[in-house]
Amino acid sequence: MLGLPEEAASTLESLLCLQLRLSYLSTQTPKALREYTHSRDAGGITRRAEAALLARISSEYSFPRALNSAAASAPGAADAAADAASSAILPLLAEHLELDLAKKDPEAWKAVRAVFERAHPWAVRTECLLVEGCDDRITVPYEAGRITNKYHCSPVPTPEVVSRSSCTSSSSSRRAFGSADDARHDLLLTWALKKGVGRDQTRDDSTRELYDDGGFTNRMSDVRRRLLDVLGMDRKTVEVFLTPSGSDAEFLPTALACVRARRLGHKAADGPAVTSIVVAAGEVGSGTAGAAGGKHFSKLTPRGTPGRPENHVEGMPAGDVVVVQMKTRSKSGAFLPCEDLVRSAVHKALSSCPTSVVVVHFVAGSKTGICSPSENVLAEMRQRYGERLLVVVDACQLRLEDQNVRKYVSLGFLTLVTGSKFYCGPPFCGAVLFPPEALAELQAGHEHLPAGFDDYFTRHEVDSRYSTLRSRLPSWENRGLLLRWTSALTNMEAVKSIPKNRLNAFVSSWVQEVHDNVQDKWPYLSLLPEQRTGEPSIAVGGVNTVVPIVVRVPRTSSEGSDGNPEVALGYEDLRLFHRLLSEDIGRYLPQDLAVGDRAAARLRVLFGQPVKLGGASFGVIRIALGADMLMDAFCRGDPPLSEENVPAAGEGGGVARLLTQIVFWRAGGRTKHEKRLGPRRDAPCLHPTMTRGFVVVWMRSRLDA
C-alpha cells in the first residue's frame, strides 16, 4: 500500500476494516444491535467491545457522519476538517485494536496516518454514503428502530417488497446498488493501494484537486458525460450542473434570475427582483416553492448543517424573490388549464418594474402526470418578453421522450431532471441542464451567489471550464451524490438499451392493464379523468405512466349523503393507508389466520405517496411504472409484455392481485381479525378519521376476491 512497510500496511488495513465494521453496526436498529452484541459465541466479547466503541464515537462525532465531516467544514477548509475528523477517530480505532506502531515506528505511523486521512471517508458502508449529502427526506433513523426513510424506501435492495412507487422514491435495486458499491470500493482502493496518489503541495490550485481527490473530480465529470450521453445530448450545446435533488436544483434558476435582474439595473428599492411562478402547486416537489424562493426546505442541508425551513438561505435578501403558486385542479379534482392565470401574473410582475425578471415553471409531468402550462403559451411569452422571462422546465420525473428534453434546452429553457424518479435511482440525485450561455451568465454574476449555497453545492458538480464559478463554490465532496448518480445511470443506460418499439409497447400495455383493473374495482377504486390539452403527448410511450387512484369507502350515516353510497378518502386518511400498505401487517394478526390471508397480509407494497388535489376534499395514491420494472420484464424476455410479466415478491405481484388485496371491513368489533388488531401495543394505530366505521387491512390475495 503506497510503498508502506509490511507492518504499516497491515496496520492501515486493520484500521480501515474496523471502521467498515463500525459503519455496518451503525445501520442496525437498537434491537438488532442488542441481539448482535449479546450472542454467546466466541465472538461475543469482541462484538460488545465494538458496539461500545461505536457508541462512544457516535456520541462524540455523530458516526458515521463524522467520517464525512469535511461536509460540515468552513468554506475552503475541507482538507482541514477531514484531518480533524480522522485525527479524532484514528486514536480511538488504534486503541481498540491495541496497535503500538506509533510508539515502535513513528515515521511509519505518520505514513499510515497520512493515507488513512484520505482513505477513511470511503471506508464506510455504501448504504451509509447513499443517504449522505442530501436532506432529511432520505435519512434512515436506525436509532429509532426504523430501517427505511420517510417514504418507506431502503438504501439497500429489498427484493421482498413490491415497488410501484417510482413517482415518489425507490429502494436501491441489486444492479444499481452494486454499481455504487463498486464505485465506493474503487475509490477506497485508490487511496489505500494506488501508488503515487496523494497530496501534492507543489501543484497550483487549478490542477491540484485532480490529483488530491483520488479520482473524485474525474468521476463527477464522468457522471455529467454519461448523463448527456444517455439523453442523446451534444456536449457543445448543453452544460450539466449536478444537484443533490430536484428540490435543490430550484435554487439555481432563481440565482440566475437574480443575477440577470441586477445586470438589467435592478436595485433593492425597486421591489422584488424576481417573481417565480410555480405551476401545479401541490403536485410538484414539496420543496419546490421554498427553494424557488431561496429558502431552506429541510432541517438538514446536503452539507450536514442544520437548515431552518421557510427561512432564506444565508445571503439571500428576504425581499428579492416572490413566489406565486398556481393550482391546476378544481374542487372535484378535475384538471384546470392555467394559461390565462400565468399570462396575467407574468404581465403584472413585469409591468410593475422594468428591471425585474419572471421565472415561469413548465411542469413536464407532475406527481400525477399532468403537463402545464401549454408550450405554445410559453413560446408566445418568450417572444414578447425576451430575456426578462426565464422558463424552467420541471422534468424531474423524467417520464419524457428524450427528444423533448433536447428540445427544451435548445429553446433556451433551464431543464431540471433527476435519476431518482422514473429511472429508480436511490433518492435523490438531480441536475440542471443549462444552455451554455445561461451558465456563463450565472458565472459572470458569481459574486452575487448567496453564501448559503455553500451548504448545497460544490465545485465538483460543474465542469472545470467554468473555473471562475468553481472557485466561488466550496471544495467539500458530496460522496453520496456521486454514488446515487452512479446507481441511477446504471438503470438509465440499461433502459436505453431496450428497443424503443418494444419499450413503447410494454408501456402502453401496462398502463392500459392498470386502468382496466382499477375500473374493475369500482366503486372502491377509480381513476382521475385524463388531462386533455390538444397538444401531442411528450411522455415516454405516449401515455402517462403515473396512474392516480381514488380510494373510496362506504359512507357512514354521520357523513350525510350526496346521493353516493361511498366517500373518497382524504389526504390524511390516505397517508395512513399508504403506510399500512408498506408494512407487514401479518405480524399483527392471529396465529390461526388462514395461510393465504397471512401471505397477503405480510406482503409489503410501495405505491406513490398520497397527493392532495388542489381544493378537492380527497386525494389520490399512485401506482407508477419504473425503470426497475422495465429491466425486470425485458431481462426475462417472456411474452406477453405486461404487468403480470414483472417479477414481484411473494404472491400477488401483478397489479390485479395488488388491487384486489385492498379490502374494507366493517368496524365495531364485528370482524374477528379486526378485534385482534387492537390489543397489541405494537400494532399500527388507526387514525379515527380513517375508520369511519371501516378499517383498511391487507386480505386475501386472489383475483376473485
Image (tube, rainbow, N blue to C red):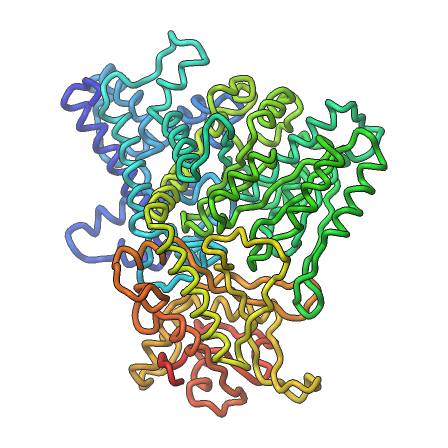
Q: Give the quadrant of the N terminus.
A: top left
Q: What residue lies at 66% left-to-right and 62% top-to-bottom?
A: 335
Residue 85: image x %, image y %? 41, 29
**Where is residue 620, by image quadrant?**
bottom right
Q: How many marks?
A: 0
| Residue 150 seen in the figure | no
**Where is residue 603, by image quadrant?**
bottom left
Residue 262: image x %, image y %? 74, 25
Q: Give the quadrant of the C terminus.
A: bottom left
Give left or right: position of 47 versus 158: left
Tell me: residue 631, above or below residue 705. Answer: above
Q: Residue furthest top?
A: 202
Tell me: residue 280, above or below residue 691. Answer: above
Q: What residue lies at 54% left-to-right and 89% top-to-bottom?
A: 668
Residue 334: image x %, image y %? 66, 66
- For this rendering, which residue is in front, 241 or 385? 385
| Residue 379 seen in the figure | yes
Q: Residue furthest bottom?
A: 670
Q: What residue lies at 25% left-to-right and 20% top-to-bottom?
A: 109
Give left or right: position of 58 versus 390: left
- For this rendering, which residue is in front, 688 or 178? 178
Tell me: residue 494, above or below residue 384. Answer: below
Tell me: residue 666, above or below residue 369. Answer: below
Residue 574: image x %, image y %? 56, 69
